Structures are given as structure tokens and as C-alpha cells.
Amino acid sequence: MLLASVIRGTRAIPVQSAVFSKTKIHRSQNTWENNFLCVLCWLLNEIQVKACFLSDWGFRRVSYLKLLQEQKEHWFLVRIVDNIIVESKKAKRLLKKCGLQPGHALDLGRVLLRQDAAVSVRLIGIWAKGHREPWWLATHLEDSLAHLAALYDHRMAIEEQIRDTKGARFGLKLVWT
């Protein structure tokens, strides 16, 4: 399930959603996600609204990051996995080997992602005290680390809504309907 929400205060208001199912028409989840993003951007552009796309942990798809970069009217902040190759002016290495320690932040600047250097993004790492792992955030924004961390932290309002929508334990399990 993909869900696009507008954040107002501490609440997330859904504006677009879709449930993926493999059919003859849509066999690829990647294509389905890319199409969802394109339709959402088209709708936002039609009503002249700018958005910041926050995508949660686990993304490594370069095609998704490239598509986000092509949306010049909008911003993005995507949490990526740490087992991806990054290439900076200084070195080429696995992201998890960049030396980020708990309680610290690191701005790697513009880096190339993957072994084939398929996309260039600004990459920051933030490892909050008490957390098990860092946030590795890919973006094209030039804002301060503190501002980007605060912006990405808004995703929890969306996560709670997704849990309420999809989950059977605390939510309505709407996928069943």
C-alpha cells in the first residue's frame, strides 16, 4: 500500500492511496511505485502545490531517486539502506563503513550511489543517542542537518497513520476490505 499524506501539526491527512496487486498489467512493484509518484506529482502540479516527499527506510532503488530528482517543483528526503556503495571525492566504500558513531551526524555532501554511480545526491547521516542505527538520508536540499532531521522526523505522523490504516493489531486493516 502506498499512501501520500499532508502533514498539518502532528496529524497526517491522506490525499492519495493505492494498493499494489500483481496483475497482468502491473507486474513490477517498482513500476507501480514510480507511476504512483508521477500521478501524484502531476496532481500537485495541477493545483500548484509544492511538496516534500519523505520516504522511509529501505529504499535503494536508484530509479526512484532519479524520478524524485526530475520533479523540479518538489523536494525529497529519502532514508536509504546502509549496504549501498557511495562514492565521494575522497573514497568509494559501503555506506555503513563511513564511520558514523552514535550521537553524531555526518554530511557527506554530494555522492554517487551504487557501484555504477547511477545517481548523485546529497547524503547525510544522523545517529541519535539511544537509537540502534543511523538515519542515512538522501536529498537534494541544501538545508542544515538540524532542519533536515526535523523534516524527516515528520514521517512518524505518517507512520502512525499507515499503522492505523494497514495494521490489524491497532488499526482497521483496511487492506482486508
Image: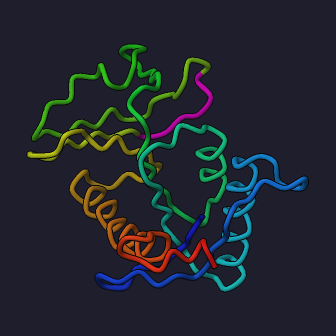
- Quarter that holds the C terminus: bottom right
Residue range highlighted in magenta: 117-122
- Quarter that holds the N terminus: bottom right
> Where is residue 139 shown, x and y percent of the image?
45, 48
Picture quadrant of residue 106: top left
Which colour assignment does the render follow?
A: rainbow
> Where is residue 169 shown, x and y percent of the image?
37, 70
Magenta region's main secondary structure? strand
Magenta span includes 129: no
Residue 124 vs residue 177, the one in the foreground: 177
Picture quadrant of residue 4: bottom right
Q: Which residue, as the protein is rendered here, is positioned at the far right?
A: 24
Looking at the image, residue 159 lies above or below residue 32:
below
Left or right side of 64 for 125: left
Left or right side of 38 for 3: left
> Where is residue 167 shown, x and y percent of the image?
44, 69
Left or right side of 74 for 144: left
Residue 174 vs residue 134, the one in the foreground: 174
> Where is residue 153 shown, x and y percent of the image?
29, 62
Residue 14 vs residue 115, the one in the foreground: 14
Residue 167 vs residue 58, the one in the foreground: 167
Query: What residue sits 41% from the left and 47% below the top?
Result: 57
Magenta span includes 118: yes
Query: What residue sits 81% from the left and 48% below the top?
Result: 27
| Total marks placed | 0
Looking at the image, residue 66 lies above or below residue 71:
above
Query: What residue sits 83% from the left and 54% below the top?
Result: 26
